[in-house]
Amino acid sequence: MAHFPKPAAGSWTQAYPDLGTDPVDYKSSTDPEHYALEQKAIFKRTWLNVGRIERLPKTGSYFTRELPSVCQGTSLIIVKGKDGVVRAFHNICRHRGNKLVWNDFPNEETEGTCRQFTCKYHAWRYSLDGDLTFIQQEGEFFDVDKSQYGLVSVRCEVWEGFIFVNFDDNAEPLNEYLGPLGKGIEGYPFHEMTEVYSYKAEIGSNWKLFMDAFTEFYHAPILHQGQYTKEEAAKIQQHGFEALHYELSGPHSVISTWGGQSPPADLNMVKPMDRTLRSGLFGPWDKPDIEGLDSLPPGVNPARAPKWGIDSFVFFPNFMVLLWEPGWYLTYQYWPTAVDKHIFEASLYFVPPRNARERLAQELAAVTFKEYALQDANTLEATQTMIGTGVVDKFLLCDQEILLRHLHKTASDYVAEYLKTESDKMTNKEHANGATC
């Protein structure tokens, strides 16, 4: 993995010359036709994280995932079989197409444990492996072969406890797709951090715009100044913010920065509540005593900075993992539902608390994070409204916004490659038809 120092202004972006330094075109965030192409070119062809392995603690454990980003109405069942293998299936009965697994409201996700899946409509049954095992009044059908009517499977692989699916049968294996950045953090003790706080909201902006907000810290001294004491906010605003390290690897990227030490070097920069509970936006200050935090994987803190605080990994298209120095992690996901809307999901993962004070410290971190996220979301809806006017469609990005530049180029490259592939298919088909004639 190549690491590029920053000897002069602009060198991060210039270390990747194919990115260029021109203003970036944001029309892809306002064009409905381009959004439809992103669904086909990106979300139907890349690995998508759908959850953690802890949600499937035993045989027959399952949960459903609604994925309109792939195609409107797409719903999956994720289940652990008797052999311990995690599988994914389209959530659709092979009889008349009813949604197979749901509770009171068909459009809401659900979870549970079962021995088999039974359709609510006509009681067709399917095993945990997806095989059709029972047809009500089977004799009424005509020469039916149950082995041909199992649930439709979706590629499913697990990496470091994260469950991924891919709708493209020809896509490369998950480990290869995640590449060096994924390899570099293997061994991090994700499995120890099972206390989870989650948020989910519909945001009125294109999915890439919210990712933009969380792949740079250029905005932090201005937008989030209310989260600091007055004196510290003035100091940070005056000097600005610069991260320690930026890196691009294929479609993925990482930004590494200071902050999050436990406790902060200057206790005057945080609020009295933070000092009382020894917690805040950077998470609980007291690092948990578990294996794997003293000797971190080589991809964590790639700059080897003594005051390192956070690594934010962006796994294209829509999955972000943030590793925090005090010993917890955070995930973001962005699921587009329209060109100007998406579902934002965030989860904070901690080692289970041992007492009430540790629990309150985790809850304070979760509440503080929510305040930051609301500030970002509110700003982005204003951004979407304005760029939607088309008055301006190309925007300047500074060197600290290299991950934004990379994200928009990567998304556009996927669409361009998809269009080329489809064009080649059409040309080959025309040639074949001509040859036949």
Image (cartoon, rainbow, N blue to C red):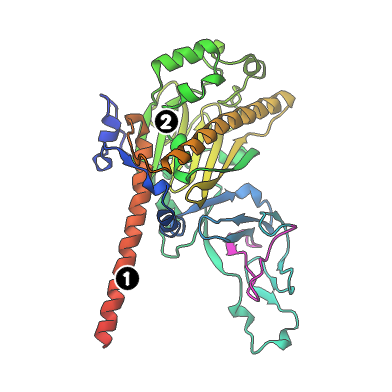
Q: Is residue 350 left or right of residue 302?
A: right
Q: Is residue 304 left or right of residue 333?
A: left
Could you tell me what secondary structure mostly forms the magenta stretch? loop
Q: Quadrant of the C terminus?
A: bottom left
Secondary-structure class at tag 2: strand
Q: Is residue 18 left or right of residue 384?
A: left
Instruction: State which region is magenta.
Output: 81-104
The residue lying toward the viewer, choosing from 183 and 152, is 152
Percent x, y for residue 130? 62, 69
Percent x, y for residue 150? 61, 73
- Which residue is label 1 attached to? 425
Q: Quadrant of the N terminus?
A: top left
Instruction: Establish if 371 lies above or below 135.
Output: above
Three-letter code for the amino acid on which mark 1 is drawn: Lys
Percent x, y for residue 136? 75, 79
Three-letter code for the amino acid on which mark 2 is drawn: Ser
